[in-house]
Image (cartoon, rainbow, N blue to C red):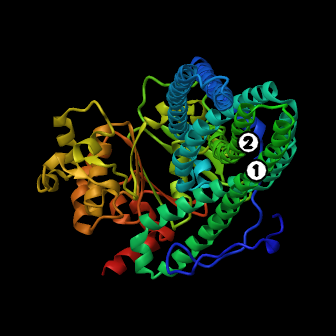
Amino acid sequence: MADETKTQIPKPTRQRGPMGRMGGMGRGEKAKDFKGTMRQLLGYIGQHKIAVFAAVAFAVCSVIFNIVGPKVLGQVTTKLFEGLVAKVNGTGDVDFNWIAKTLGFLLCLYLASSACSLIQGWLMTGVTQKICYRMRKEIAAKIAVVPMSYFNGHSKGDVLSRITNDVDTLGQSLNQSVTQLITSITQIIGVLVMMLSISLPLTGVTVLTLPAAAIILMVMIHFSQPYFREQQQVLGTVNGIIEEDFAGQNVIQVFDRAEASIEEFDKENDRLFISGWRSQFLSGLMMPLMSLVGNMGYVGVVVVGAQLALTGNATPGDIQSFIQYVRNFTQPVQQLGNVSNTMQSMAAATERVFEFLAAPEEEQKVDAQIPEKRPGHVEFDHVKFGYTPDKTIIHDFSCEAQPGQTIAIVGPTGAGKTTLIKLLQRFYDVDDGSLRVEGIDVRDWDRAALRGEFAMVLQDTWLFNGTIRENIRYGRPDASDAEVEAAARAARCDHFIHTLAGGYDFMINEEGTNLSQGQRQLVTIARAILADRPALILDEATSNVDTRTEELIQRAMDALMQGRTSFVIAHRLSTIRNADVILVIRDGDIVEKGTHDELLAQGGFYADLYNSQFDEAA
């Protein structure tokens, strides 16, 4: 299977849609640490020792009650056979009274077995669901402390796949595999003891099939494990593509990139098809091969059993019960093969979950500081930063913002404007130099307190599925309805809110698509006003609204910035004419600095940029 050119895989029919052309794919990566993953998982299982031990006990009891049945039934068969022979010879009769009592006892055994199995299943379902619940909580908590750099290298779909698909796979597989593993091993041992009590030669014939079954099991595990892991990995990639295409469908249609989008999806879908086909095909071979081995043992027992019966070394009941035990013996052996398949899928999914949980977290100093007074003093001191070591974005940036000052940052796309904002909130740490807020290096701040220093309005608005009131209150959950409405009036969005059905209780859908871009921006501005933080970050805050709306909110923004340190990134230079300091950035360096009038008088890059905007407007 390692040589792809020798593997014949049926290709899906070509369609204009999810299934497309078949692409090449290298062999999947093996699980990095199968044993280590299982040890970690046992740590989660160990939190429920009592329930697990109880489930094991009920599983063992269920198997014991079940495997005694064929032995009892064999005794009934022998008793019936001997009674019929005695009746024919005129020396006796069938003891139906004994047979009826024995069959009643047998029925009780099977009922007890079913009851124990039911309780065991109930206990294990509870354990697995609690483990999944705990993992989802840990993943959700992890998302809040994973650095932004992690999400730069992982798609949203991949993270979502780990939370949903991988945890679900873990839960289903764990429930099935633990139950089957316990019952299969118990049944193999119990049946083996019962077979030895009946006939050593017949037991020997049955046991001879075990080496063949073990070899098949190991070979299938060796070849299928890499593909199970790759299947989970590619599934995360496919989820990411689907999410991206769904979110950007309007852009895809406008630029006529539907075919290119389909081709990209097809490429990953082909990989998913191949890895899924290989893993499922190899795992599917397990059962028929194990069944073949079991049937060979069954035939051997019938032949040897017939010879023993003819020589008087075995009764008809012994043969009948032993044949049942052969089936009961081969069935758990086959189930172990099925468990191995399930565990490969579970290991791949579990490993991905643990990889995310083991991802580096944002560093938090034990003695992190939380200043009592926060007037809004910010200082960049010879800051140097790059997202990767080989590409510096900010070269040598120095700037001081006094409390209450408005600092406007302008420059061409890619100059590093938004990067400065990310550094300010410590989504990333500077490579060199220092960044101080309230005179304290941001690396010494408590992260939550540092980010609580700023209110923020971004170019890409983020609203959640909820009422307008809830979205505005997001910046300050304890705010009263009156304060929410006051913030909306200050942001000049109270009027349009009252035109909506339900007013402040109007339900915003996912992504906020039932509001216009300008309305969404106004709601986020109201949220920032309500938050009432000592410093503001306005990243292209008015770039996505029309001129009339811009003029409407500019007065509110000016009032909001009074007494607060504000960092404003804007394309429309007309909105920053009143800024205390304007920094003109190009390639990560400050090339000009001053007030609006001072920079115009210099006749440099800012003046050219400002005049060009008015020429375009003219």
Q: CA distance from mark 1 to mark 2?
A: 8 Å
Can you name the residue that lies furthest to the front here?
Answer: 90
Residue drawn 45% across the image and 82% down it: 256
- Would residue 447 be found to the left or right of residue 319 on screen? left
Q: Position of residue 131 (x, y in %)?
A: 55, 31
State how many labels appear: 2
Residue 330: mark in rendering: 2
Disc 2 residue type (three-letter): Thr
Q: Position of residue 106 (x, y in %)?
A: 57, 25
Q: Could you say which is closer to the camera, residue 115 or residue 56?
A: 115
Note whether 196 is above or below 569 in the view shown. Answer: above
Q: Position of residue 605 (x, y in %)?
A: 51, 70
Using the rendered image of the protein, determine whether residue 572 is visible from the camera's viewpoint. Answer: yes
Q: Could you say which is closer to the camera, residue 153 or residue 536?
A: 153
Mark 1 and mark 2 in contact? Answer it, CB < 8 Å. yes
Q: Secondary structure at mark 2?
A: helix
- Would residue 141 be found to the left or right of residue 27 on screen? left
Q: Residues within 10 Å of mark 2 (few under 14, many from 20)?
A: many
Residue 295: mark in rendering: 1
Residue drawn 16% across the image and 36% down it: 482
Q: Secondary structure at mark 1?
A: helix
Which quarter of the rendered picture does the N terminus lie within?
Answer: bottom right
Residue 8: mark in rendering: none
- Would residue 168 be found to the left or right of residue 199 on screen? left
Can you name the residue that lies furthest to the top here?
Answer: 50
